[in-house]
Amino acid sequence: MVTEHTNSQQHLVSGWVEEFRPFSKNGQCANYIPALAEKNPLQLAISIVGPSNNEMKAGDTTELFTLQSVSKVVTFILACMDRGLPYVLERVDVEPTGDTFNSIIRLESHRPGKPFNPMINAGAITVSSMLSGISPQEKIEKILYFLEQMVGKKLKVNEEVFQSEWQTANRNRSLAYYLMDSGFLDCPVEEALEVYLKQCAIEVNVSDLAMIGLVIANDGYHPQLKTQLFPKQVAKLAKALMVTCGMYNASGKFSAFIGLPAKSGVSGAILAAVPSHASLNSPFPDGCGIGIYGPAIDSIGNSVAGVKLLKHLATEWDMNIF
Ligand code: DON
């Protein structure tokens, strides 16, 4: 139910979107994936969803975009459920790198070649390879079904974005071959890549993103379904990884000055999970999920206007988890 109070807050959020939209000019749409380069860089949208299905949204909220690296959190959670934590952690570490998301350097310099964390491409490709399923299609169906439970509707892979990236994925292919060589892939290179690139191309809007954030904020419990979708221990680990590695090599600054578990993607997506203890002074005192879309990204890969908007909102509503 929307109250008078939330109506005035809603007005405030709409104003913030317009205030921060012009910052998009300081970024550019990802140009290494041709289908993303064509997006309108001035778009900006936000959705904030609380456990009683209370939502505030503003900006270009009907725009569809792809999850890209935000999908890494989802597949990490699924792999932990599929294989158990010890199996996953034997194959991927939980240490931040400080390197760019698609860097290959540590795979050789850090013996025995184990990927540093599941939020960089090397770790995410490893995680995708270990999902259960006899084919890439079965693995993708599984990811889509898991997401459907969280967001309450069927999602699909944007074939154009997938094809666009599949044909230009030389760096990811190199990473996958290196991982295969050092024994970290559970399936053939092309299959792991197909799963990874298709999960990146799953299409959502900001409300979907906020719902995923809400379930993560609630330690895997879906407040509307009243169901534990994944174990609390896995949710805690996912949030720790979001804090330490979720915003690429800007994760330190993001934690220091915004202080929220978050994950970004080169499509300009940002997912944040706000626990209740950090949102007591906000219109969402029982916690919330936040979804943001602003396709103009900085050189690190984070939405320029999106990060500014999230910083402002988290400061105004006193949401820093620390
Ligand atoms: O692997 C890629 O390049 C993209 N599909 C995803 C990149 C992304 O969002 C950044 N990853 N941390």
Image (cartoon, helix red, strand yellow):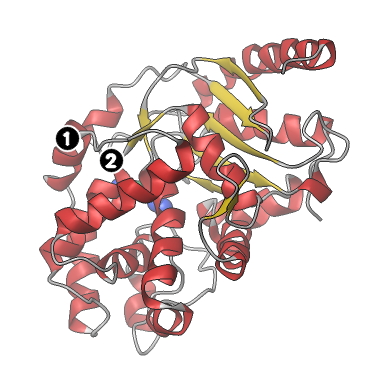
- Residue behind label 2 places its C-beta within 8 angstroms of ligand 1: yes
In this view of the protein, which residue sits in the foreground, 280 or 60?
280
Question: Is 211 displayed left or right of 299 in the figure?
Answer: right
Residue occupying the point 35% across, 72% down:
105
The residue that label 1 is drawn on is 159
Three-letter code for the amino acid on which mark 2 is drawn: Ala
The residue that label 2 is drawn on is 201
Quarter-of-image position of residue 211? top right
Residue occupying the point 29% across, 48% down:
199
Which labelled disc corresponds to residue 92? Answer: none
Helix, strand or loop under label 1: helix
Q: Position of residue 255 (x, y in %)?
A: 70, 53
Residue occupying the point 36% across, 44% down:
68
Quarter-of-image position of residue 114? bottom left
Q: Quadrant of the N terminus?
A: top right
Q: Quadrant of the C terminus?
A: bottom right
In this view of the protein, which residue sits in the foreground, 238 or 139?
139
In this view of the protein, which residue sits in the foreground, 234 or 307?
234
Q: Position of residue 250 (x, y in %)?
A: 58, 52
Helix, strand or loop under label 2: loop
Three-letter code for the amino acid on which mark 1 is drawn: Glu
- Residue behind label 1 places its C-beta within 8 angstroms of ligand 1: no
Pointers 1 and 2 in contact (C-beta within 8 Å): yes
Residue occupying the point 42% across, 20% down:
41
Q: Is residue 214 above or below residue 321?
A: above
